[in-house]
């Protein structure tokens, strides 16, 4: 039985899940989708409508879900020690968490397949690695947490999930449109394929392409919004019935002026990038940065698209820390398939590379963190970066403030849970450093400040990042987001593009917004030329 207390806006979602049975819950991050989903499932269990529910989640939040079930139901519980940290989760007779190595997972799947447990929690990797075991669980309810995991309808994960169609299907995501309307089409294919119909009809109705087949704009988004409402319930953190239960958000952008040496190197990379863009345009090609950073193939650095991306990557690394360039060159020369040949060649021809020591963004970050903790010695701060290799440089600058919690994709689920718990419970741990691995599904209500050391190219990733501390469980009345942007660089254009992508999502989900996403060769070239003044 559910024992928690729901906010009125959550009650509406619970009632809709129970009534519709197939639903996209597109509540903004931090509004309590986990809690309302548990409430809905418990109601369905109590009515005898379901007997077993599978919850597929990002690996980082398996234990977070288990803890929530223990906290908000009357289930018997057990205490586990994970990396020295104790957590309370449901007894395994009620909730099976699929976790660990293959042999251990096999035992857990056998228990889940008996159908005696109410809940089975597994990560999306089970779709690929434990598919047969998953299919043998007698589940009549399936929940997809962070359902953007199936936004790419050509991926194997997406295709397999769509074979799982129990009577109760609930997709949870605050970002069903991460960068483009195609994202929500794939999610809705699983929830209810009749809502948006066939792909060819969807494309003709909502997408405008140029002669090269590249998307130039979207149309009829008000109609798409209306269709989605048939199987989508949406609440934004700014809605009048939601806002009183969440902290207000103050977001600022702080520009960082480059020193002369860094500016000189940046201009050289900028010139190479302009040349690569000219080659790409001459070849009649285009590219999508957000698609690239979601893993779409560009053919490596030997294609026109790959050459553009290599130079963009070099520019971003330089702006974050010149050490990232050195690290990439070393990895390339080690021949392990990592690192960038462009960066290695570039540094090989740059005689003064060893003298490139200035780190203006890192200096600005340190200055901001110093000021925050001087004003409030108990403050907790989350810092996000795209680059895992940036974490040691960040730690070196910030460890004067005590223990640092480092969170990244190289940690297993237990290690991640321990890092998160340490940041939450240790009063001496003030700084949480994370790659985008911590940007999805993770609750950081203790943090009052979130600093984007750099920005991703995906609007969905940024929206997820920026909501980690904007939670209904936050104890702060106001939380802060700070974006660090290098002045007169590609970072300024990236921020503007992300803001436009956000307005596209607003148009689809909330019925308001902009429909044009200028992510083309021409727009990037124009931005670079505007800020380019060769020495």
Image (cartoon, rainbow, N blue to C red):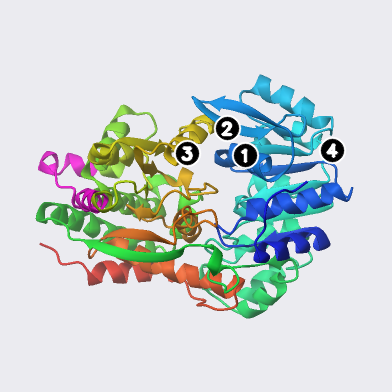
Distance between mark 1 and mark 3 Cα atoms = 13 Å
Quadrant housing residue 389: top left
Distance between mark 2 and mark 1 Cα atoms = 7 Å
Per the image, label 3 sits on a secondary structure element best described as: helix
Sequence-wise, the earlier of marks 1 and 3 is 1
Per the image, label 2 sits on a secondary structure element best described as: strand
* Picture layout, residue 249 above or below residue 144: below
On screen, residue 535 versus residue 13, left or right, reads left
In front of the other: 296 or 416: 416
Residue 35 image point, x, y percent: 66, 51
In front of the other: 144 or 367: 367
Q: In the rendering, which numbered label is found on residue 420?
A: 3
Residues drawn in magenta:
344-371
Sequence-wise, the earlier of marks 3 and 2 is 2
* Picture layout, residue 307 above or below residue 104: below
Q: Residue at x 72, y 26 (%)?
A: 108
- Residue 35 painted magenta: no
Q: In the rendering, which numbered label is found on residue 146?
A: none
Distance between mark 4 and mark 1 Cα atoms = 23 Å
Return the residue at label 4: 138
Quadrant housing residue 65: top right
Quadrant housing residue 328: top left
Residue 435 image point, x, y percent: 41, 44
Distance between mark 3 and mark 2 Cα atoms = 12 Å
Q: Do the residues labelled 2 and 1 touch (CB within 8 Å)?
A: yes
Per the image, label 1 sits on a secondary structure element best described as: helix
Return the residue at label 1: 67
Q: Which residue is drawn at 64% across and 67% down?
A: 234
Q: In the rendering, which numbered label is found on residue 87?
A: 2
Q: Tell which tag, 4 or 1, sits nearer the viewer.
A: 1
Label 3 Cα crowd, 10 Å radius (few <14 / some 14-19 / many 20+):
many
Distance between mark 2 and mark 4 Cα atoms = 28 Å
């Amino acid at each position: 039985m559910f024992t928690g207390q729901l906010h009125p806006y959550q009650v509406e979602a619970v009632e809709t899940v129970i009534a519709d049975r197939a639903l996209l819950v597109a509540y903004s991050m931090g509004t309590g989708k986990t809690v309302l989903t548990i409430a809905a499932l418990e109601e369905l269990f109590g009515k005898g409508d379901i007997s077993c529910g599978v919850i597929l989640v990002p690996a980082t939040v398996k234990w977070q879900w288990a803890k929530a079930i223990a906290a908000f139901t009357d289930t018997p519980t057990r205490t586990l020690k994970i990396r020295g940290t104790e957590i309370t989760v449901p007894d395994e007779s009620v909730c099976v968490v699929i976790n660990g190595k293959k042999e251990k997972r096999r035992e857990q799947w056998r228990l889940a397949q008996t159908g005696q447990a109410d809940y089975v929690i597994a990560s999306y990797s089970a779709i690929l690695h434990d598919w047969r075991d998953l299919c043998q669980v007698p589940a009549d309810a399936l929940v997809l947490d962070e359902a953007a995991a199936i936004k790419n309808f050509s991926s194997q994960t997406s295709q397999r999930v769509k074979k799982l169609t129990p009577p109760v299907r609930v997709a949870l995501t605050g970002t069903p449109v991460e960068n483009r309307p195609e994202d929500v089409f794939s999610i809705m294919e699983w929830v209810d394929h009749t809502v948006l119909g066939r792909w060819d009809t969807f494309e003709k109705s909502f997408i405008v392409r140029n002669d090269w087949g590249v998307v130039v704009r979207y149309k009829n988004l008000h109609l798409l919004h209306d269709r989605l409402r048939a199987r989508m319930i949406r609440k934004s953190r700014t809605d009048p019935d939601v806002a009183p239960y969440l902290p207000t958000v103050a977001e600022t952008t702080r520009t960082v002026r480059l020193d002369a040496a860094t500016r000189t190197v940046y201009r050289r990379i900028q010139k190479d990038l302009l040349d690569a863009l000219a080659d790409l345009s001459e070849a009649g090609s285009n590219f999508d940065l957000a698609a690239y950073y979601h893993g779409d193939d560009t053919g490596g650095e030997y294609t026109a698209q790959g050459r553009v991306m290599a130079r963009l990557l070099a520019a971003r690394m330089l702006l974050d820390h010149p050490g990232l360039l050195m690290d990439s060159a070393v990895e390339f020369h080690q021949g392990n398939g990592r690192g960038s040949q462009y960066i290695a060649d570039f540094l090989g021809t740059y005689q003064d590379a060893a003298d490139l020591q200035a780190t203006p963004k890192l200096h600005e970050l340190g200055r901001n963190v110093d000021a925050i903790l001087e004003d409030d010695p108990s403050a907790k701060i989350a810092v996000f970066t795209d680059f895992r290799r940036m974490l040691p440089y960040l730690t070196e600058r910030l460890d004067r403030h005590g223990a640092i919690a480092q969170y990244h994709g190289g940690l297993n689920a237990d290690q991640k849970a321990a890092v998160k718990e340490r940041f939450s419970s240790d009063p001496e741990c003030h700084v949480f450093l994370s790659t985008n691995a911590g940007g999805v599904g993770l609750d950081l209500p203790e943090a009052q400040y979130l600093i984007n050391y750099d920005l991703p190219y995906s609007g969905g990733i940024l929206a997820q990042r920026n909501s980690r501390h904007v939670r209904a469980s936050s104890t702060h009345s106001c939380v802060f987001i700070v974006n660090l942007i290098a002045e007169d660089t590609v970072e300024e254009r990236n921020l503007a593009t992300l803001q436009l992508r956000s307005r596209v999502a607003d148009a689809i989900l909330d019925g308001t917004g902009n429909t044009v996403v200028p992510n083309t060769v021409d727009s990037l070239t124009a931005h670079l030329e505007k800020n380019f003044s060769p020495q």
